[in-house]
Amino acid sequence: MQTQVKYQTETRVVSFGDRQIRINSHTPILPPKERERRKREAEQRLFDVFSKYANIPN
């Protein structure tokens, strides 16, 4: 059984030319260990993508 993930919502209004645009950011509220695990996973995937296209000699 999975638990329902709760989210923290942040709303900002930014100017774009003569228009006002509302930006809603939703961030999951996670336990510290889970947040750190997901952060490491995202960093590793980004590293894999960037290293694939970088001119780094092996």
Image: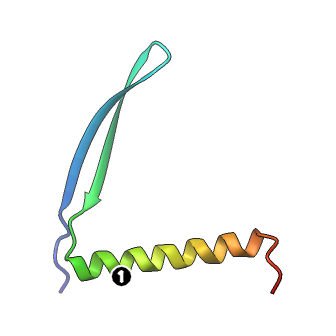
Residue placed furthest toward the front: 57
Relative horizontal placement of residue 48, taking residue 36 as reference (left or right): right
Q: Quadrant of the C terminus?
A: bottom right
- Residue 34 position within the rendered picture, expressed as x and y whole percent measured from the top left: 28, 80
Q: Residue at x 60, y 75 (%)?
A: 47
Above or below, 34 relative to 23: below
Instruction: Report the residue at 22% width, 49% height from top.
Output: 9
3 in relation to 27, above or below: below
Position in image of residue 5 (x %, y %): 20, 69
Q: Residue at x 56, y 76 (%)?
A: 45
The residue at which mark 1 appears reads as 37
Q: Is residue 39 left or right of residue 27?
A: right
Q: How far from the left and from the top, in percent, is residue 33?
A: 25, 82
Return the x and y of residue 29 as percentages of the image width and height.
Answer: 20, 66
Count of residue discs: 1
Tell me which residue sits at (26%, 38%) in the image: 11
Instruction: Say which of 38 and 3 sits in front.
Output: 38
Give neighbour class at mark 1: few <14, some 14-19, many 20+ (Cα, 10 Å). few
Place residue 53 in its image quadrant: bottom right
Residue type at the position of mark 1 = Arg
Of the 4 image quadrants, the one containing the N terminus is bottom left
| Between 54 and 10, the one nearer to me in the picture | 54
Check the image and name the residue furthest to the top: 18
Q: Would you say 9 lies left or right of 45 here?
A: left
Display colour scheme: rainbow
Label 1 sits on a secondary structure element that is helix
